[in-house]
Image: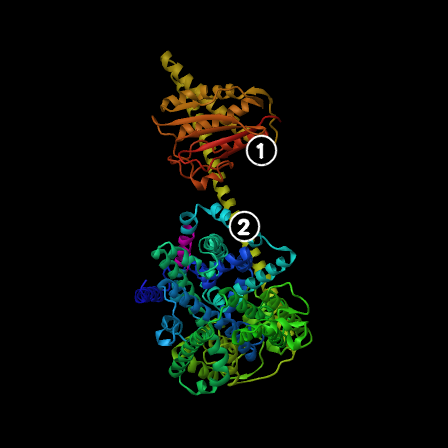
Amino acid sequence: MSSWFLISIILFYLVFLFFIAYLAEKNPNSKWVNNPYVYALSFAVYCSAWTYYGSIGVAAEKGVDFLTIYLGPILAAPLWIIVLRKVIRISKQHKISSLADFISLRYGKNRFLGALVTFICVVGILPYISLQLQAVSETFKILTRTNLESNSIVNDSTFYIALILAIFAAFFGTRITDASRKHGGIIASIALESVLKLVFFLAVGIYVTYFLFDGMKDIVTQFSTLPNFNSKVTLSGFEAGFNWFFTIMLSFIAIFLLPRQFQVSVLENNKEKHIKTAVWLFPFYLLLINIFVIFIAYGGKINLGDGFNSEYFSLLLPLEEGNVFLALLVFLGGLSAVVSMVIVSSLALSIMISNNLIIPYGFLGKLIKNRSEKNTRFIRNIRRFAIFFIITIAYAFYYNFSIELSLYSIGLIAFVIIAQIGPSFFIGLFWNRGSSKGAIIGIIGGFAVTCFTLIIPFIIEALSGSNAFVEEGLFSIDLLKPHALFGIDFLTPHAHAFFWSILINLLLYMYFSLNSVGNYRERNYAEMFVDSKNYASLQDGAFVWKGEGYVEDIKSVLTKFLGFEKTKKALRIFFNKYNLSEDTRLADARLINFSEQLLTGTVGSASAKILIQSVVKEEEISLVEVLKVLEESKEAKTQSKILSQKSKELSLLANQLKNANKELVEKDVQKDEFLDTVAHELKTPLTGIRASTELLLDDVEMPTEIKSQFLSNILQDSERLSRLINNILDFEKLSNNRQELSIKQNDISKTLIKTIRVLQTNANKKNIQIILKNNYGVKLPYDEDRMIQVFTNVISNAIKFCKPEKGEILVDYRLGNNHLEISIKDNGKGIANEDVAYIFDKFYQSKNQNTIKPEGTGLGLAISKQIVEKHKGKIWVNKTSKNGSEFKIKIPLKL
């Protein structure tokens, strides 16, 4: 493939990424930008060229050892719900802009500690970035089949790629001076690159496994005939287990503390709930991107042998088969991995260098004298310079030290260096005794051990090509061999370096933390970090400060960095929040804390503290006073919680009383309506009887047929009056447990047939069908007369509310566990939702009946419920019934 053609494709691809980032910056609230999947996919910036090429090299030479780099993040993912959420809350509250800022803040905004963390990150990541550039260079040469080394930067395509990446990062990463603000454009482009590199990697994996070979089994079968097969598919004993453990621990720490990972997981988080998606999606992504690693590695060994660099088998295999298009996709996937890593790393490091090195150690005085517009430009230019500086040094490292070290080796060196931040970070989140002195000495001690065991041997070998220092040790002392310190010689170099450095780091951190007392700010922030539940509310009362300061002086400092309008708006929000007058002159602890938080995103936490301290007179506070204030704050918080809980309980009780009162009023109204209805119902037959009787007495010559009709009316009204009185008496007896049941073994099918036969006349008048779906005999103990009364009440209601001609009532029953369940379902108007809960209450009648005066006495279903419950059964309305209503009655098979 032509070099110029490939360069043009690279340029087109990078312009495409620019365009995606630009669109995302224009629409930061779009669902395509601000969503949990974009956030989770941005975590895949972890998968750099190391993943794309280095893992295959490790798999080819060492077998399954490559998995350790991914097992750490997978094991860490569930802990994100606790650890990452806590870190995000703290960072948002304090407008943290970098990992160095976060650790500096934890230890009282210690300026030197922030600078030290920045130094560690720069030393660890710069060679790592250079290896990314080397991967681009090597794959470019493979794809274009050019083996000539570039003798000039001008002729080196990697230089131009590095330059474009620097421009990309500088343009989208420094548009705003508040580094705590989100970089939606960069995150969107990284998420897209994560998808592309996964798709392209899966494509070459499928091609190698199922097109070059006959599946995974075929590759393993052929590879098993090569030498050293068993050592590449198994762990070689107890010692190898230690190497796995320490490498997994390295990757576990790295997923939290690599600057690029802290940037995307913490600083670019828009919503805490997005973490839930990342917890499962990122491990799933790692699983997918590693499925074919071992098979590509083995396939390369089988087809290409040992004459090629195994790290680039994914590119070499399709090229050897003449599949240039697939090779180009692999190259673009690798380029995506490099672009993501370089851009985010350079952005994160540039903020650290700006906020923790350049500004606090040289330019604070100048910034205080400048105006806000000039300061904004100056800070932006510092960060742009830092980005170009980082990528330039990384390129220089690549250009001048193109030694035969793999991506895997350089990556692990970076992991070991970054791991030195681990104790001060993780322990500081959960242990309030950790001090800045312990953190500083621990990091320096751990880094010194790393230098001796890993970095110095690497540099000596790179410059001289000699391995004597590793073989002989310092001063030719066996116990001081860099890779076998104090006789421990069974670990790999990186595992060995990690073990000793982290051990020394931890011991120094714990010793100096326990034997030194930090200043009041350290203890203050330590308490706030450790107790970070309800974090925002805790900050308002937990920041301890004593001194003299004026609002106007603080406002002047804020204006120089934020501008007049932004400062005015921020202070107005502050005064409104705490219900303070805007004419307030003296500053308190809350304003000091608020002002430092505002400045942190722009100049870093340490510089923010220095700037505010420059215009206020802060008094030293004893540790006893700090602890007293913190205890008072905690006590006040506890009391507030108790009062809040009591308030909720009282509110709930008040609502319950209100509802009970409302229910009593409704019951009273229903009772009045019931009595009115009963009086009306009693009066109606009595009036008919009296009228018929008077007519019979007055007119002795009345024809016989008319007399018979009047007598028949008197009889019907008497029966109606009798039924009504019996109904009321029944309810009264059932309510007072004075009604005895006549329990006998009865056949439910016969009982239902009797009930339906009695009601069939009423149903026929409206042309309504009553269908008994089941006629199997089931015998169980119950009072048949009373159960007929229940079925009659329910079916009569169904007849009443079914439409003439179209009505249908289905009666069914089935056996359950130790009970019989009877269902009576109709296709009528149904029961309103608000009636369902009260329909079996005495005196209750639906408000949605179609008559002016409710039909019946409102006792039918109440009596039915009493009867069923006396049978130790249950009656209810099926709420899931869509059409009409369905009553269900459950009766036990044994009483």
**Nearest to N terminus: mark 1 or mark 2:** 2
Q: Quadrant of residue 853?
A: top left
Determine the secondary structure under disc 2: helix
Q: Position of residue 788 (x, y in %)?
A: 51, 23
Query: Foreground residue, 151 or 392?
Result: 151
Is residue 491 in view from this perspective? yes
Residue 95: x and y, percent?
48, 71
Dot 2 surroundings within 10 Å: few (below 14), some, or many (20 or more)? Answer: few
Determine whether 734 is above or below 612 in the image: above
Q: Is residue 575 in view from this perspective? A: no
Q: Give the residue drawn at x 60%, y 33%.
A: 736
Q: Which residue is mark 1?
A: 735
Q: For residue 571, what is the image quadrant?
A: bottom left
Q: Which quarter of the figure has residue 872? A: top right
Q: Amino acid at mark 1?
A: Ser
**Label 1: few (<14), some (14–19) or many (≥20) C-alpha neighbours in 10 Å:** some
Name the mark on residue 608: none
> Which stretch did the figure color magenta?
194-206
Residue 847 place in picture, x, y as percent: 42, 39
Q: Main secondary structure of the magenta part?
A: helix
The nearer-to-camera label among 1 and 2 is 2
Spatial separation of the CA atoms under disc 1 and disc 2: 26 Å
On the image, numbered disc 2 is attached to which residue? 656
**Residue at left offset 42%, top offset 59%:** 194
The three-letter amino acid code for the residue at tag 2 is Gln
Q: Nearer the viewer, residue 34 or 70?
A: 70
